[in-house]
Amino acid sequence: MLLPWEYGVRNLARRPLRTALTLVALATVVMLVFVVVGFIRGLEQSLAVSGDPDVVLVYSVNSEENIENSSIAARTPSLLVASLDGVANRFGVTCVSPELYLGTRVKTADGSGGLGLVRGVKLSAPLVRRSVQLIQGDWPEEGEVIVGRLATAKLGSTETALSVGETIEFEGRSWVISGRFAAGGSAYESEIWCQLEDFQIATKRQDLSLVAMLLSPGNSAAEVELFCKERTDLELRAIRETDYYATLQQHYKPVRVLAWFVVVLVSAAGIFAGLNMMYGAVAGRVRELATLQAIGFRRRAILISLIQEGVLLAAAGSLLSGAIALTMLNGMAVRFTMGAFTLRIDSVAILIGCGVGLMLGVLGALPPAIKALKAEVATSLKSI
């Protein structure tokens, strides 16, 4: 016969201070799990939505995977358009975006700032970068820039310092913020965009970093790749944009593995903390447990009741942490080497976090309960 369900619930209420401390400890452990898993899911989501399967990137073959180090001739866009037939045309404009992209020191009006990612583009850029949407202000003119909605996180600045009308400095010039843009959570959202010609003058460069081309329906990136391989004199490399960000996924794989290792370490630490607290809780109830055995309850029934108490506390802590994570952590911007992205507390993160919490409740209560129930009933009844 099992102990009544209400018995375990009442036991938690009989020791409010110990129960509250255990709840806070369990909730803290689960919260750390939510943070780490949200980081992993946010990084993966940012890279997953950054690529467009119809866009091909052409850049220097010598730069490997780092486009910031790429340098190609300014005549490359016109050469590609003249040599290839599969480039899309929208509204009478060829969908080719020549771009100069690099990391540089950016200073905001309030004196803050840091290493920012700046991309010089032309008016054709929105036709190729189809996820980019201007959400405030206007497209930049000479001496102006537009900033992504996560640029504040990348620069470690504030929303006020990067609001429309404010001034920022980079490459020895002052630039007025004319607008803000979003890009569906992609990597572009941590960047600053300006006119290509302006950026070339500021950096004293006439070359480009890359050319992004939108292919018309039915055309393959293989044609562009073949052209780049045949024209060895140009030293160009072509790759579908989705494949490029897939390689970045592999590049950041050690980071994700390390983050999952942190989840395991945090969970292990939580289990040991739960063991410590449950040992203390059970040690003060030796006579109670012995009395239950003396009046006829089996050890298995008492063990299940103790596990019930641990699981109830763990479930409450998991729900508390989940509510905080969804309301306060979900969507929080995080600075990273590739730019910035947002923590993502999705169904996977909730499942892992709550699963870890319930595991803490079971594994934390099981060993001390077994140890207490192994003692002789007569000896336990005499304990103080």
Image: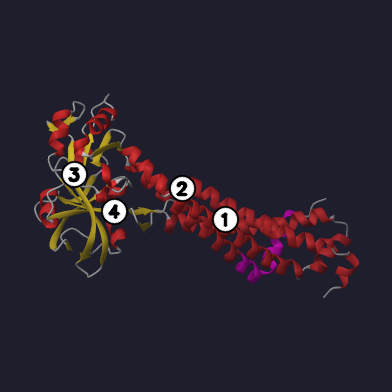
Q: Give the mark, 4 or 1, whose residue is nearer the N terminus.
A: 4
Coloring scheme of the render? secondary structure
Q: Give the mark, 4 or 3, whose residue is nearer the N terminus.
A: 3
Q: Residue at x 70, y 59 (%)?
A: 365
Q: Which mark is residue 264?
A: 1
Kind of residue at badge 2: Asp
Viewer-side residue, 29 vs 316: 29
Kind of residue at badge 4: Ser
Q: What residue is disc 4 on?
A: 190
Kind of residue at badge 1: Val
Range covered by the magenta-colored residues: 4-22
Q: What residue is disc 3 on?
A: 72
Residue 383 at what x, y percent from top left? 84, 73
Q: Nearer the viewer, mark 1 or mark 2?
A: 1
Q: Please tell me how crowded label 1 is: few (under 14), some (14-19), or many (20+) other residues with Cα within 10 Å.
A: some
Q: Which mark is residue 74?
A: none
Q: Give the mark, 4 or 2, whose residue is nearer the N terminus.
A: 4
Q: Residue at x 18, y 40 (%)?
A: 97
